[in-house]
Amino acid sequence: MWITNPRNAPPEWIEIFVGRKLPRTIIIDTKEATLNVAKSITKIRGTNASNLYIEIKFNYEYVDFPSEINLFFESTFNSDLGKPILKLYWEKPNGETIYLADYTIRSQDDRFYITINEKVRQKLFDYYADKGIKLNRTLMVQEILFGDMDNYDPNTHAEVLQGDYKLIIKGKVFGEESDIDVKLVVYGQVYGIAGTDHLRRPLEIALLWGTPIALSFGLIASLVTTFLQMIIATISGWYGGIVDDIIQRLTEVYMVIPFLPFLILISAFYKMDIWIILAVVIILSIFGGGVKSTRALVMQIKEYPYVEAAIAYGASDIRIIFFYIIPKILPPMVPGLIGSVPGYVFLEAALSFLGLGDPYLPTWGKVINDAFSNGALYKGYFYWVLEPSLLLILTALAFSFIGFALDKIVNPRLREI
């Protein structure tokens, strides 16, 4: 579905750094009645054949060459009577008309990739060789089709010939109902606000789709982990004794376990979706360092007079924990809860970057993984890595600032500074 998008095209804002307007994709379809399209089918008397004539005209105003040129055919024909036979011509603004190729339509939806067709390339070299112009073999097909070959110097780069171009298709179709429509796509060098990847997919879709996934993962993991750690720490601090000893020893064991390598090991052996990964992250984070810090608060609060008064009038342990202790320790924990969200977002991105995340979701880490797998940095597609990385950095900064602000609200001492 992305076939009309340029491959590995940087975003349009890259022009700010390039300093000139780069080519955009030009799409002209004969099914759409425009002034740029002329089409006729003329019946040949005494036969079941008809002459087909299609002319597509467009203006090319850029100083850089397009990245590709492709044709997409939609046809109706009876293969028993004969497949449509076409001749393709290319007309330049200077009046040159170049014969490109013979082509036989093979199916109802057929494609002809002009820029990678070796026969087209050879015909272009032969055409200019007959005119006494020797072309450099490193020239690409689009450079020859859009270049000013009359003033071409083999020792320099070809210059773009701006003006009106025409694609002319002449051919024969067989049968009363036979018809052909063609879509000409002259691919640009830039696309959209985020560019495209190696499969022509717009990156803004993956980045936008990955935003709620990353935020949901981070918020849910942080919220559930903080809440469970708070409950466990409160139980540990309130009951003391053997319950406290068991919880503290278990917490110390969890703190010794290397979290990320252990999670990578699990993900490598078991292909998991995003929700199973989230559950594993929560399980591995329940007995974390937050249990010890929260327990220290509980040990202080359980000595407060209002807690002793609750014990005196016979309040149950559950009531004291959930109505007297947790409301007291909850406000100081909120900034930490918010501040830990970026850590879980980066964790999910790291797993996806290593190829251990959900294989079906276009997360930020998956975008970076695709970029490295296809040599984005080596080939100069820096935008492919920078855009998801920038979103990760902005997420970390945003939640950090929110955490600092909440910390000042719930901690009066910080507000006085």
Image (tube, rainbow, N blue to C red):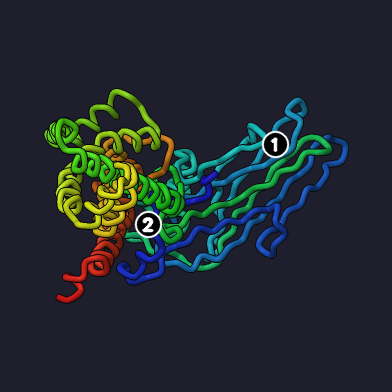
Seen as rendered, the residue at the extreme top is: 269
Of callouts 1 and 2, which one flags the residue occurring earlier in the amino acid sequence?
A: 2
User: How far is the residue under mark 1 from the one under mark 2?
Assistant: 38 Å
Residue 267 in sight from this viewpoint = yes
In terms of secondary structure, where does tag 1 sit? loop
Kindly identify which numbered label has been placed on residue 84. 1
Q: Is residue 72 left or right of residue 415?
A: right
In terms of secondary structure, where does tag 2 sit? loop
Q: Is residue 23 left or right of residue 378?
A: right
Kindly identify which numbered label has been placed on residue 10. 2
Residue 154 in sight from this viewpoint = no
Q: Position of residue 173 (x, y in %)?
A: 74, 38
Seen as rendered, the residue at the extreme bottom is: 416
Q: Residue at x 51, y 46 (%)?
A: 2
Q: Is residue 224 left or right of residue 112?
A: left
Q: Residue at x 25, y 38 (%)?
A: 286
Report which quarter residue 63 is drawn in.
bottom left
Comparing 411 with 303, the one in front is 303
Comparing 210 with 17, the one in front is 210
